[in-house]
């Protein structure tokens, strides 16, 4: 009977009710549907014993992959977790485990993949390793012909062989100084073979023969004929376009592409048909009018090099740059181009920030100017007619002023640029600042009561107040019944938090209050909250906690007992 009563109470109690979780709906009798688990089928393989780098790659797909196994001839070769990436078997392990000692031999690899529902799919690949019965395979290179003295010539043999052993390269020629020569040879690891054939003599033929041997004694050869012809051509030089630029501008150069098999030297001669040394601000020491002689001309690139001459800082005038190149056999080639330096007839070019508008209090605004001028001299920056910065203008191509914190109205930013020839450009940017259109933010307004007496409580109001332009004042207003509203300034107690004291009110009194916030903008926007009632409720002083007064009481009683004991002992004497 008692047990039944306890169970009944538990079932009816709130505790029993909160033990039932109804936050997540239950779904009953809904079948589980999965996407199809798939795996591809790599082709079966047959290759010679010793062939390296062969792999089986299975690509399987499933939204919820789990694990995999790979068997070799029915025995587990590999297994583990599977995250949907390809499953790879490197067949070089057949040699590492010495499984190809008897040929031919076949291996059956089966890959099985599983998903989270323990569904699986498999694929089988048969790998057959046969005996190496073919000699090395050499891809035949082309014969080579080059001009004596040129460089960067190579014979490259690409070779396929599973079981490499040794190689050698020989050279035969009708050149009596090298009739038959072994160029190189030795142990061969199966990699491709490359040799350099530079530096041979003209009018002779040279036959380079490669011999390669595998570990079974099978071999292959390849011969390449190299013919060297006499250098009968003059140096090669291209013809760049003529150059014209504004006096004082920078970044100008002449670049000739040149080539010769047997380069010797070159000269660059500068002449002029007209020159004005008094135009502009140029010092003679900076003008590149010197002729250039390179007595030991060598190429660093087999395809040819580039010879470059900087032609900045020239006087006003017309120039001719003539390059002449010589080879070891006295042959030569030349090219000439004209360089024209014309007057600076344009004022400075300026690209400025477009006029813009922003609301009072916002920030992050800049006025930018990018400028272009070949002969800069002087600049001045001003705002509303008041100079901000000025001075000598050299290589500066960018100017910037901060436009934050401006007063309401339209402000004029002016950049004045003067070049060496007193050509002037003025660039004006108008920045308009509109009045603050947003009220101060007032949030988290709350009334706080504190015990004053048995019949009265102290009342205060707190609020978070913020504005982009700062806060000018925050007040709290209140009234009771039909009386006129009173007000008091609220004081900041922390960042954005304001507090205001309203005084003491009797228990049961309804006090209506609101917060009035004024920002510090030019228009002094005011945000006034709605009147909010608060009822003064009875409060009492917090009683002394039992954990505090019980020990004190015990100590007091014990002290009294000690005192009384001493008293009565004294009386009996």
Image (cartoon, rainbow, N blue to C red):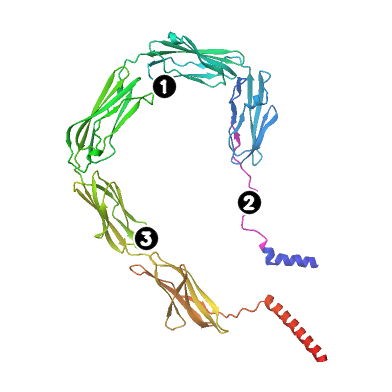
For mark 2, what is the residue? 27
The image shows residue 497, relative to residue 402, as above or below, that is below
Quick one: quadrant of the N terminus? bottom right
| Along the line of sight, the residue nearer the viewer: 121 or 404 | 404
Dot 2 or dot 3: first in sequence order is 2
| Along the line of sight, the residue nearer the viewer: 6 or 133 | 133
For mark 3, what is the residue? 362
Inter-mark Cα distance, 1 to 3: 66 Å
Residue 297 % position (x, y): 33, 25
Magenta-tinted stretch:
18-40
Q: Which mark is residue 152?
A: 1
Q: Is residue 37 magenta?
A: yes
Q: Nearer the viewer, mark 1 or mark 3?
A: 1
Q: Is residue 75 left or right of residue 268?
A: right
| Along the line of sight, the residue nearer the viewer: 183 or 130 | 183
Q: Is residue 41 in view from this perspective? A: no
Inter-mark Cα distance, 2 to 3: 54 Å
Q: Is residue 144 magenta?
A: no
- Magenta: main secondary structure equals loop
The image shows residue 261, relative to residue 206, as above or below, that is below
Residue 536 % position (x, y): 53, 79
Q: Nearer the viewer, mark 1 or mark 2?
A: 1
Inter-mark Cα distance, 1 to 2: 76 Å
Q: Is residue 566 left or right of residue 26?
A: right
Residue 73 % position (x, y): 69, 26
SS at mark 1 in the image: loop
Identify the residue at horizontal 62%, vertical 38% (top origin). Answer: 82
| Along the line of sight, the residue nearer the viewer: 179 or 59 | 179
């Amino acid at each position: 009977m008692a047990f039944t009563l306890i169970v009944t109470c538990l079932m009816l109690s709130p505790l029993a009710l909160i033990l039932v979780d109804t936050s997540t709906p239950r779904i009953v009798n809904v079948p589980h549907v999965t996407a199809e688990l798939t795996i591809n089928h790599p082709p079966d393989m047959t290759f010679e014993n010793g062939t390296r780098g062969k792999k089986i790659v299975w690509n399987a797909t499933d939204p919820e992959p789990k694990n995999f196994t790979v068997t070799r001839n029915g025995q587990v070769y590999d297994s583990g977790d599977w995250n949907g990436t390809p499953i790879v078997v490197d067949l070089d392990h057949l040699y590492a485990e010495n499984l190809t000692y008897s040929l031919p031999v076949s291996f059956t690899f089966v890959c099985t993949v599983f998903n989270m529902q323990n569904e699986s799919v498999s694929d089988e690949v048969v790998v057959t390793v046969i005996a190496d019965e073919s000699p090395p395979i050499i891809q035949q290179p082309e014969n080579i012909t080059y001009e004596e003295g040129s460089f960067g010539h190579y014979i490259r043999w690409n070779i396929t062989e599973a079981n490499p052993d040794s190689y050698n390269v020989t050279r035969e020629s009708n050149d009596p100084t090298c009739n038959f020569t072994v160029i190189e040879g030795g142990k061969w690891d199966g990699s491709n073979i490359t040799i350099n054939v530079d530096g041979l003599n003209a009018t002779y033929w040279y036959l380079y023969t490669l011999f390669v041997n595998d570990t079974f004694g099978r071999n292959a050869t390849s011969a390449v004929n190299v013919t060297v012809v006499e250098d009968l051509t003059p140096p090669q030089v291209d013809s760049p376009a003529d150059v014209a630029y504004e006096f004082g501008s920078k970044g100008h150069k002449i670049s000739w592409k040149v080539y010769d098999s047997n380069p010797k030297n070159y000269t660059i001669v500068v002449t002029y048909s007209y020159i004005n040394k008094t135009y502009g601000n140029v010092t003679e020491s900076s003008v590149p009018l010197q002729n250039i002689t390179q007595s030991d001309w060598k190429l660093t690139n087999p395809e040819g090099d580039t010879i470059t001459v900087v032609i900045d800082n020239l006087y006003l005038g017309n120039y001719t740059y003539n390059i002449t190149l010589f080879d070891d056999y006295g042959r030569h080639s030349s090219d000439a181009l004209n360089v024209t330096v014309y007057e600076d007839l344009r004022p400075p070019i300026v690209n400025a920030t477009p006029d813009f508008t922003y609301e009072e209090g916002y920030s992050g605004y800049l006025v930018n100017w990018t400028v272009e001028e070949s002969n800069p001299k002087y600049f001045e920056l001003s705002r509303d007619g008041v100079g901000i910065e000025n001075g000598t203008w050299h290589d500066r191509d960018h100017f910037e002023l901060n436009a934050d914190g401006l007063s309401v109205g339209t402000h004029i930013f002016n950049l004045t640029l003067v070049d060496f020839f007193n050509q002037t450009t003025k660039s004006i940017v108008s920045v308009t600042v509109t009045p603050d259109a947003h009220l101060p933010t007032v949030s988290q307004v709350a009334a706080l009561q504190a015990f004053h007496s048995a019949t009265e409580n102290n009342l205060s109001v707190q609020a978070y107040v913020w504005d982009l332009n700062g806060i000018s004042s925050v007040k709290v207003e209140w009234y009771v019944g039909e009386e006129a509203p009173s007000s008091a300034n609220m004081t900041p107690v922390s960042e954005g938090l304001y507090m205001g004291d309203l005084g003491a009110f009797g228990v049961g009194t309804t006090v209506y209050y609101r917060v009035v916030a004024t920002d510090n903008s030019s228009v002094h926007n005011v945000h006034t909250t709605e009147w909010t009632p608060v009822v003064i409720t009875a409060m009492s002083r917090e009683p002394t906690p039992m954990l505090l007064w019980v020990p004190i009481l015990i100590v007091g009683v014990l002290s009294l007992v000690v005192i009384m004991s001493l008293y009565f002992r004294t009386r009996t004497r």
